[in-house]
Amino acid sequence: MNRLVLATALLASVLCSALVIVAEEPARPNILWITSEDNGPHLGCYGDDYATTPNLDALAVRGMIYRTCWSNAPVCAPARTTIISGMYPTSLGAEHMRSMTRLPDAFKMYPQYLREAGYYCTNNSKEDYNLEKPGKVWDDSSGKAHWKNRADGQPFFAIFNHTISHESKLRTRPHKAVHDPAKVRVPAYHPDTPEVRQDWAQYYDRLTEMDVLAGANLQEIAEAGLADDTIVFYYGDHGSGMPRSKRWPYNSGLHVPLIVYIPEKFQHLRPDDYVAGGSTDRLVSFVDLAPTLLSLCGIEPPAHMQGHAFAGKFTAPRQDFVYGYRGRMDERYDMVRSVTDGRYVYIRNYMPHKIYGQYIDYMFQTPTTRIWKELFDAGQLNEAQSHFWKAKPGEELYDLKNDPDEVHNLANSPEHQEIRQRMREAQQYLAVKIRDIGFLPEGEIHLRSAGSTPYEMAHDDAQYPLAKIMAVAEKASLLRIDAIGNLISATLDEDSAVRYWGAMGLLMRGETGVSVSRGLLWKALNDESPGVRIAAAEALGRYGNKVDVAAALPVLLDLASPTENGVYTSMAALNAIDSLGAKAASAIKQIAELPTQDPKADGRMKGYVPNLIKKTLADLK
């Protein structure tokens, strides 16, 4: 064989090998996410006969529904932060509504991993993260963002977010009813009034409108001939916009619909429980979405992501629990953690002295909220309906099979102690595993992490001794009287967060807590930590004598200025002042003259301090 013939043969062999490699390389799927705001699984495909959702029902016939999917957070910004990071915001210092912090430099948001792999990534259009974006995240994130704008042959990942079902749309009046309010199922925790029925019916009307928009997204894919090349997810961004769903980490606030369609072409990416037209009981949540997306695209999820892929090349084992959390909601502080195994829901209230239905300006614009509170004040509600307007127990446990509305607390039921202990241990395990930063006052999260990030700070035990802090928080919030000695000792600890929970525990015990620790609480009014000073002042102001109030109120007023103390300390102090009720009447003039803005705060928070001042003054006049 001469050299020319040999060279030709070798070239042909190389070309054939290349062609085989190209032919054998699997195609990459396009991925479409259709999302809707403020709605639970109130869809026909989930067995809701009152719902009218034909397009999503048809998607479920082709795909599969997840019976237990939790949004982790029951409100938009923290929930979306969970999705974009693949991490629990409670580990990032980002659990509070419209706070702002940042990821460690080595971490990225999931679209950045996709873009590095060649995907065209669009978001149409809401972001609302509690994290600064680490560089360019999306190819396009706007009202015009669309997968059609990609390069020829480029795989895409596209989100279309529909706002028509948002809380604000449930109360828009006038409204032409489509679903008959008389046929609404009113949950046991809501009073059965015309206002409540109209809000619920209007919610279902908005879901029907949302379904039309989702259908249009699916039709675009079909008309472009891409239906067999595109994996589709549909989900709601947290529970319904009705009060005690949105903002609350019950199942009613966290349970969302999730429909996943994986075409035959990509059946190798389907999980082992995938059945077209079927359903699965696999427990999934929003923290799993980013790892699952990367897995479907052939990208191994980075180790820092805390979720578990439930489909694709890197599918993880099934999980026994999924988790929820609640931090500050707009202008009101709280700390709640929850967990479910699909049957039982366990709620851990770390601030049980605060009522469920704290006054939030935005929430009280809904007619249901207003009439509900009016009926409570008039003494016209039953026990289940009254619960929302009272202080919380330290623990709650609900059986979703027998009590889907979560109104019968089984935490003290002798027959359920083993279940309560198992769920409590699961909740505590996750807090320790992810280094839950929520045990710090919000302002202190940022103070301790200055020059770094909250995540990195929380993983340094010298800066954040979680075990010691959490142990005191547990004793404080379980409300046992025999823990008072431990709480008194905690107020003398070298760590300010330990002192904070010591003071909080005494506050939670009301007059008893103040009477046995008055001297220590007075000393704490001069603590270097604003959080400790506020907790001590609230305890003395609410449950002390006139001398105590006279000492406490100036401390709170001094910390209430957002320009001098920052928005987080200001909100905490104003919440404490508001809790004093008529005891704060002497400070009306000072409250009215307070500045309302922290120039360094994220612009999305600009209404919170004014809302607190307005409500406090209205209650005092």
Image (spheres, grey):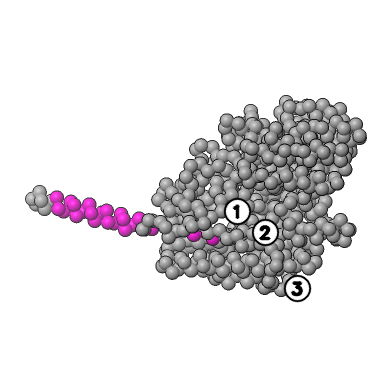
Relative depth, front residue between 397 and 71: 71
Image mark for residue 285 = 1
Residue located at (70% from left, 62% from top): 171
State the extent of the magenta-drawn residues as a range: 7-34
Q: Is 414 situated left or right of 219 in this image?
A: right
Is label 3 in a helix, a strand or a loop?
helix
Residue located at (75% from left, 45% from top): 612
Q: Amino acid at mark 1?
A: Ser
Q: Which residue lies under the disc numbered 2?
A: 167
Q: Position of residue 572 (x, y in %)?
A: 74, 39
Residue 342 inside the magenta-drawn segment: no
Q: Position of residue 36 (x, y in %)?
A: 59, 60
Visible residue check, residue 87: yes
Quadrant housing residue 539: top right
Magenta: main secondary structure equals helix
Visible residue check, residue 332: no
Reply above or below: 424 against 441.
Answer: below
Q: Amino acid at mark 2?
A: Glu
Q: Which residue lies under the disc numbered 3?
A: 182
Residue located at (78% from left, 68% from top): 194
Measured in 3D between alpha carbons, the distance from the residue under mark 1 to the one under mark 3, in whole angstroms, is 34 Å
Quadrant housing residue 332: top right
Mark toward the start of the polypeptide (2 vs 3): 2
Q: Is 15 situated left or right of 123 in this image?
A: left
Is label 1 in a helix, a strand or a loop?
strand
